[in-house]
Image: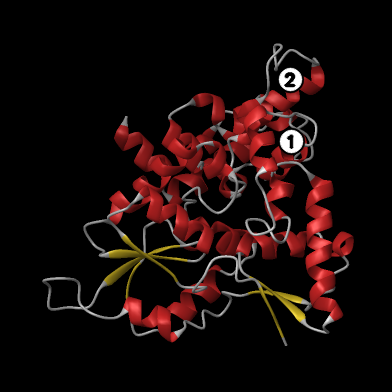
Amino acid sequence: MRSILKIVSTPAKWVSKKILHATLLRFPGGDAKTPQSCAFCPELCRFACPVAVASGNDVVTPSNKVALLYKEERWPGAAAAGGELWPIYACTSCGRCSDYCLYDVPVGDLLVLARQEFRWGPAEQAKANLDRKVDPCGDLAAELGDWQLALRRAKEFGLAAGARGQALELEEPQSAYFFQEHRSELGVGEGRWAWRGRGYRISEEVRAKLNGAPQGAPRRRRWLVVESPWASRRLGFAQEIHEALAREDQEWVWPFQSGSDSIDVGGEGVFGRLFPEIAARMARDVWERDAGRADGIACMSERAAKHLRLALPDVEVVNLASPGFSQVRASQ
């Protein structure tokens, strides 16, 4: 069984799956705009989902989560069965399943929209704890389905910088993606915002942490690069990130699944607050695959860095994009 899982995850198998499904397994009515595609799908996206793999629970595979929405839409009350549709919150919105999907179903986006209608107790509690320090730009509120709060915070943040005649420099790649996708609603034009980590102008403070030999070894540290799916996949900066880091005089260790195929560690959005045990397992899984080749982790987001330090207390973690949390700055 393990050998089968490894084969399924390879790019060659993915290409074969695309060809096979396009010719033999396509069913009438497949449409990425509705959950119907996932209701009758053979569900090979399960191996692309870090949440499904780490939890080992079929209920939270991408196909099954969207199929729940289809059932609820077709037969109201049937999928929920008197309870709450908690599985629709068991998603980091990383978008990896959509890349592996025959119909390119935007699973993460569908689930975020559904959260506006289907509430869940722990999510409501997490929403109540989203103060401006944690969520200055509103992207986390949007992920929880509170669009009004998200829009209000994003506009306040944008107006504050705009009043000073400054462009927005966003701390988190998830915040940058939120501004990119909702420019018209937020009133932020093209070129008026940027993700702070783009280009990776690594500060001297961060560089000092990266350099030097690990204790007891006559060599420099080797850093496992844990990418942000929001930067690499959602924003499309994968090649730019790799080229920028290649120019740095550091010992980088790239995992097998990197670039636009990078694996989410579960700590950039609200997922880690809702499912801390699964999120911690996701972080451990990523580290354990390459722990023998690296001395520490270099990541792309302060939210991810905090999560990794909590899940892996014995591992040194450095955030390449920013020296501090919630230092959302406005720059000329």
The numbered disc on residue 71 is: 2
Q: Could you tell me which quadrant the C terminus lies in?
A: bottom right
Q: Which of the 4 image quadrants contains residue 232?
A: bottom right
Residue type highlighted by circle 2:
Lys
| SS under mark 1 | helix
Q: Residues within 10 Å of mark 2 (few under 14, many from 20)?
A: some
Judge from the rendering whether residue 221 lies leftward or rightward of residue 285; answer left or right.
Answer: left
Judge from the rendering whether residue 29 lies leftward or rightward of residue 26; answer left or right.
Answer: right
Q: Is residue 88 visible in the rendered structure shown here? A: yes
Q: Which percent across, then down, holds residue 230?
A: 60, 59
Residue drawn at (22%, 78%) of the image: 220
Q: Which of the 4 image quadrants contains residue 137?
A: bottom right
Up the image or down, 86 lies above or below 301; here it is: above
Residue drawn at (69%, 46%) of the image: 143
Residue type highlighted by circle 1:
Arg
Q: Which residue is mark 1?
A: 115
